[in-house]
Image (tube, grey):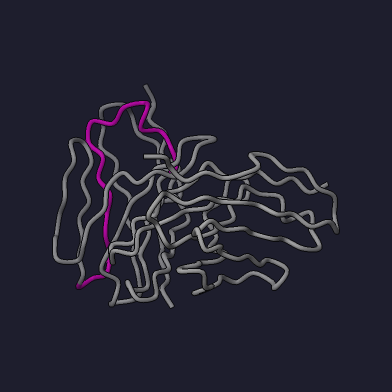
């Protein structure tokens, strides 16, 4: 089955700095990679995703990069703001037929003003 | 468009009792997923239902079970509750379009005393 490892588990940055969170996966059949943000006491919400036919995708201050050869994908947040503080989860489905996502253990990002 | 809904929001039970949690997916979504999130921890996959059938389950004992109804809503049952079952139980739904974006409900917080 799929195994997803997420690093780091905690990340503290100064407001305005960049933050990078990385995930590695094991199943080469995985072809869809979403990132979720979970604010304290709230539900996880999709913030960005990428498919395996694309190497990079951007949405304003966030971007995701994918390296299928190395089986890793990363979330990049630029110009961080205090409201970016949350837990971020990556996910990697086994494959679309299995339909089961395996989530990383999460990264707690703290942006200090 | 209404999002994923869950009921109840909070549930208090004593050890040995049974708990029933409910989830209504986004209209048109056929897949429902259940996750357990213990305090401060990640998302542990419990069950996946699609088109009324259980498609996969995570590494949880058989006392965690559920079902999906013809209207695609779902129910999670936890029998013989143990203290360590105390957690936030999240339901997510997805449209089976091969992209597997999961949209989460607000969760049910279960406390076992």
Residue pictured at 36% horizontal, 67% vertical: A93
Residue pictured at 48% horizontal, 41% vertical: A43
- Quadrant of the frame with the C terminus of chain A: top left
Residue found farthest to the front: B70
Instruction: Name above or below for residue B43 compared with residue B48.
Output: above
Q: Quadrant of residue B31?
A: bottom left
Q: Position of residue B50 (x, y in %)?
A: 46, 68
Residue numbers of the magenta segment: A69-87
Instruction: Name above or below for residue A57 compared with residue A70.
Output: above
Instruction: Name above or below for residue B1 compared with residue B32.
Output: above
Residue pictured at 62% horizontal, 58% vertical: B75
In the displayed structure, does residue A112 sit left or right of residue A57?
right
Q: Position of residue A110 (x, y in %)?
A: 42, 34
Q: Quadrant of residue B93?
A: bottom left
Along the line of sight, which residue is nearer the eye, A14 or B76? B76
Residue pictured at 48% horizontal, 56% vertical: A105
Q: Position of residue B30 (x, y in %)?
A: 42, 62
Q: Position of residue B7 (x, y in %)?
A: 62, 44
Q: How many marks?
A: 0
Decide whether residue A81 is among the magenta residues: yes
Along the line of sight, which residue is nearer the eye, A38 or B71? B71
Along the line of sight, which residue is nearer the eye, A67 or B12? B12
Instruction: Name above or below for residue B7 compared with residue B32.
Output: above
In the displayed structure, does residue B93 sit left or right of residue B101?
right
């Amino acid at each position: 089955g799929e195994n997803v490892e997420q690093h780091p588990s905690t990340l503290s940055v100064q407001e305005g700095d960049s933050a990078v969170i990385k995930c590695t996966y094991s199943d080469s059949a995985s072809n869809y990679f979403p990132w979720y943000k979970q604010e304290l006491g709230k539900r996880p919400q999709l913030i960005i995703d990428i498919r395996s036919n694309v190497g990079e995708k951007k949405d304003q201050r966030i971007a995701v990069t994918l390296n299928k050869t190395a089986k890793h994908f990363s979330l990049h947040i630029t110009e961080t703001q205090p409201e970016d503080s949350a837990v971020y989860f990556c996910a990697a489905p086994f494959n679309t037929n299995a339909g089961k996502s395996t989530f990383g253990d999460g990264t707690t990002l703290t942006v200090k003003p | 468009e209404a999002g994923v809904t869950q009921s109840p929001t909070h549930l208090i039970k004593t050890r040995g009792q049974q708990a029933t949690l409910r989830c209504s997916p986004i209209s048109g979504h056929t897949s429902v997923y259940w996750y357990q999130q213990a305090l401060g921890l990640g998302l542990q996959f419990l069950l996946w239902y699609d088109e009324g059938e259980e498609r996969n389950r995570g590494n949880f004992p058989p006392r965690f079970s559920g079902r999906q109804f013809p209207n695609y809503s779902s129910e999670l049952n936890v029998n013989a509750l143990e203290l360590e079952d105390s957690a936030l139980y999240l339901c997510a739904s997805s449209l089976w379009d091969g992209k597997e974006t999961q949209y989460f409900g607000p969760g049910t917080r279960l406390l076992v005393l």
